[in-house]
Amino acid sequence: MYHKIKKGDTFKILPFIHQDKQIYGIELNTLFQRDPLSKDVVHDTTGLLKRIYQKWLKKTKVRKNFVTGYAFNIFIDNQIKVVLLQRCYMDIIMSNRPNIFDLNSNTHLLILEDPISLMERKPEDPFIETGKTIELKDWSNQITDWPDFIKLNQPDFLGSIKEYTPLNKKEILIKEFGEDYLTEILLEDRNSRLDHLLNN
């Protein structure tokens, strides 16, 4: 289901098709446990985890193993897989719209730098090009109806992370942050909705 990108990969960016809507890229926030042996993680695509982390940072100024990635469907090796991209690749993708988001275009993303080597780089290191778009001739003729093909063949990305959401990992969040920020945020949201209903 997941593809771990490496230097030299070339792939077509595809949308997720969810409730008959095309979604290009889903922001995925992830919290890893302090214990390196723990396999418990929390994943979130709704913004809840980011809000919890921001409350924690505002109060303590202590950073945790919190990362933001961007999930995309991609077509590689004649199949659809999910890839998680860092911000540097997102910048390339966003600067090449709308071609890269056109299912009928031949525009692909070419990875020029291994993500592992990027993580080891220091801020003072010279700039390197991490990826670029390229055109593959006649590529778009392979599939006649991309939306139907994606719908039938895409991995269930949102379903695969469901058990790891903040609502399902509340105990881990309380243990990690020492407070129930999740309930606090949910109450804030509920009160905000009530205020909106009462005042409109």
Image (cartoon, rainbow, N blue to C red):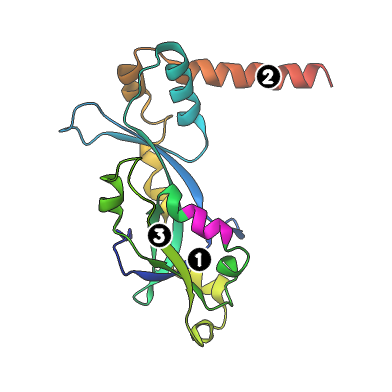
Q: Can residue 21 be seen at all in this image of the molecule?
A: yes
Q: Which of disc 2 and disc 1 is earlier in sequence? A: 1
Q: Position of residue 134 (x, y in %)?
A: 47, 74
Q: Looking at numbered disc 1 in the image, what kind of residue is underneath it?
A: Leu
Left or right relative to 64: residue 132? right
Which marked residue is nearer to the observer: mark 3 or mark 2?
3
Q: Which residue matches tag 1?
A: 14
* Residue at 57 percent of width and 16 percent of height: 187
Disc 3/disc 2 C-alpha distance (Å): 45 Å
Q: Quadrant of the N terminus?
A: bottom left
Disc 1/disc 2 C-alpha distance (Å): 36 Å
Q: Looking at numbered disc 3 in the image, what kind of residue is underneath it?
A: Glu
Q: Position of residue 80 (x, y in %)?
A: 40, 68
Report crowding for label 3: few under 14, some 14 to 19, many 20 or more residues within 10 A (C-alpha): few
Assess whether residue 91 is covered by the magenta stretch: yes
Q: Which residue matches tag 3?
A: 129
Outermost residue toward the right in this view: 200
Disc 3/disc 1 C-alpha distance (Å): 23 Å
Looking at the rendering, which quadrant does residue 163 occupy? Answer: top left
Assess whether residue 164 is covered by the magenta stretch: no
Q: Which of disc 2 and disc 3 is earlier in sequence? A: 3
Query: Which element type, helix, strand or loop, lies under badge 1?
Result: strand
Q: Nearer the viewer, residue 144 or 89?
A: 89
* Residue at 52 percent of width and 37 percent of height: 46
Q: Which residue matches tag 2?
A: 192
Which residues, given as a range, are shown in magenta? 90-95
* Residue at 82 percent of width and 17 percent of height: 199
* Residue at 51 percent of width and 15 percent of height: 184
Q: Quadrant of the C terminus?
A: top right
Query: Which element type, helix, strand or loop, lies under badge 3?
Result: loop
